[in-house]
Amino acid sequence: MYADSTAVLGPLATYAEPHCYDLCQMHSERMTAPIGWEIVRITPDPDALKPTADDLEALANAVREAARPRYEPGAEQALPAGSVEVARRGHLRMLTSVDQAQVPTDQLFDE
């Protein structure tokens, strides 16, 4: 706090705060303040730093969501307006504009 001439060092911030900076352990231990300033070091409780059941559940849900397939074989996929599908290999599609000439499909994908 600038008005109190105090520098506070504690655990990493959980939200953005102006004039606050996250430091690694080495730099936080070597931190000095201007002459006449006081440094307050807040030591976090090691048990408070451990993941909670809610943290682990949120992580598991994020992993499940990321692993969920986004493409369903056989499902009709909407095309962008003005586009035509000219070739397909698995889930990959080659699209062209309706205005452009048709591309020969036998030359699209080399095996």
Image (tube, helix red, strand yellow):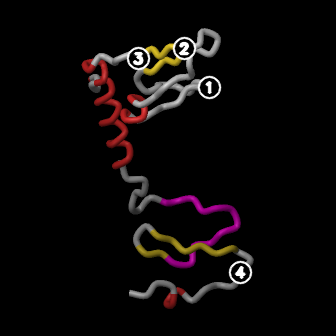
Residue type, label 4: Gln
Circles 1 and 2 in contact, beta carbons < 8 Å? no
Residue type, label 3: Arg
Q: In the depicted view, which residue is nearer to us: 42 or 66? A: 42
Which badge, 3 or 4, is on the more N-terminal residue? 3
Question: Residue tagged by mark 4?
Answer: 100
Alpha-carbon span between mark 3 and mark 4: 67 Å
Q: In the depicted view, which residue is nearer to us: 11 or 94? A: 11
Which badge, 2 or 3, is on the more N-terminal residue? 2
39 shown above or below 94? above
x and y, in percent, of residue 74 in the image: 41, 62
Q: Secondary structure at mark 2?
A: strand
Hey, which residue is sitting farthest front in the picture? Answer: 35
Circles 1 and 3 in contact, beta carbons < 8 Å? no
Which badge, 2 or 4, is on the more N-terminal residue? 2
Alpha-carbon span between mark 1 and mark 2: 16 Å
Q: Secondary structure at mark 4?
A: loop
Q: Quadrant of the N terminus?
A: top right
Question: Residue tagged by mark 3?
Answer: 41
Residue under the image location 59 percent in, 73 percent down: 95
Mark 2, Cα crowd under 10 Å, few <14 / some 14-19 / many 20+, is: some
Q: In this picture, which residue range is highlighted in magenta?
A: 76-87
28 shown above or below 40? below
Q: Which mark is residue 4?
A: none
Alpha-carbon span between mark 4 and mark 1: 53 Å
Q: Is residue 10 magenta?
A: no
Question: Residue tagged by mark 2?
Answer: 6
Q: In the depicted view, which residue is nearer to us: 79 or 17? A: 17
Residue under the image location 49 percent in, 17 percent down: 8
Mark 3, Cα crowd under 10 Å, few <14 / some 14-19 / many 20+, is: few
Which badge, 1 or 3, is on the more N-terminal residue? 1
